[in-house]
Image (spheres, rainbow, N blue to C red):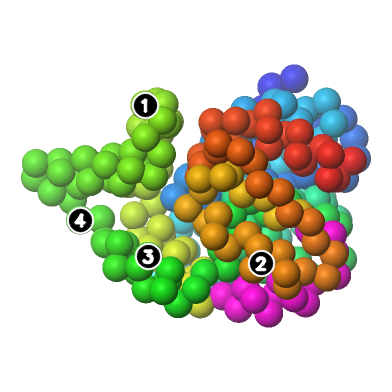
Amino acid sequence: MSIRKGYVDTPNGQIHFRQLKQVDGIPLVLFHQTASSSLMYESLMNLLADDFHTIALDTPGFGASFSPPNLFTVSYLSDSLHAALTQLGVESCFVFGHHTGSAIGLQMAFDHPNFIQKMVLSGAPLLSETQITGLKASLKPIALTEDGSHLTQVWERIRKRDSSLPLDIVHREILLTQSAREAAQGAYQAVFDQPIQHQLSSLDIPILLISGEHDTLRASLESAYQLLKHGKMKVIPNEGPYICDQNPQAVADVIKEFIL
């Protein structure tokens, strides 16, 4: 059975999703990073197909989902995706989130108790003020240019994050970033404003924090883990911020070991 795509209506707009269901059971929901889409999870979904019914959603403003208002919060993104899952008949789920997807999963677990049973968060964005200041300085609006340099700027930024990333994935991420544009800036700001420390320390569900050894959020792992009531943590050697593309098998193995 192949991955199926579809749309679901929510009070805020339509959410686009990918779904692969070869087995019954509690769904595993996948939340993507900024500025990607559920497309980043297709390899992982196929690797998990024998054990999980997987659903990967496009966050509002990304992929093929509706565009959010100019100013939005992580709660707004989380509530929109929760409404989509409810419309899809999901009463409870497991969650895997990567980077911004981790922030969304965390917010959903905090706002909707008993909805998420277990979570695996890859690169939980517990950022220091110094990190936030540095990230804000690096985030510049994507303005269209006559010579197309706005495309090469994003290309160079993605290549800098992981020089080993295959060119077809770099190309995919550039197109998704260009498509998101203002929503990408808004999503980063929304995460900066999220009370992640409070949420991490409040949740009672089992949470596994993982990070690639060379992930841009690797430095946050131990401090985030120390806040958890029922937490575990794991570093995946030699991997970076695109671990779901570069080594989906390692991610699949970690998910199955923790959740099953």
Q: Residue 135 carries which label?
A: 3
Residue 113 percent location from the top left of the image: 83, 70
For marks 3 and 4, give the one nearer the viewer. Answer: 3
Q: Say whether disc 4 or disc 1 marks the residue closer to the N-terminus.
A: 4
Q: Is mark 3 on a helix, strand or loop?
A: helix
Q: Say whether disc 2 or disc 1 marks the residue closer to the N-terminus.
A: 1
For marks 4 and 1, give the one nearer the viewer. Answer: 1
Q: Which stretch did the figure color magenta? A: 194-207
Residue on which the image places disc 1 = 167
In this rendering, the count of numbered labels is: 4
Residue type, label 1: Leu
Q: How far apart are marks 4 and 1 (CA)?
A: 23 Å
Image point (15%, 41%), residue name? 148
Residue 203 found in image quarter: bottom right
Residue 232 percent location from the top left of the image: 79, 56
Image point (33%, 38%), residue name? 159
Q: In this view, does 151 lie to the left or right of 94?
A: left
Q: Distance between the residues labelled 3 and 1?
A: 24 Å
Q: Is mark 1 on a helix, strand or loop?
A: helix
Q: 259 or 71, which lies in front?
A: 259
Residue type, label 2: Ala
Compared with 166, 235 (above or below) is below
Q: Say whether disc 3 or disc 1 marks the residue closer to the N-terminus.
A: 3
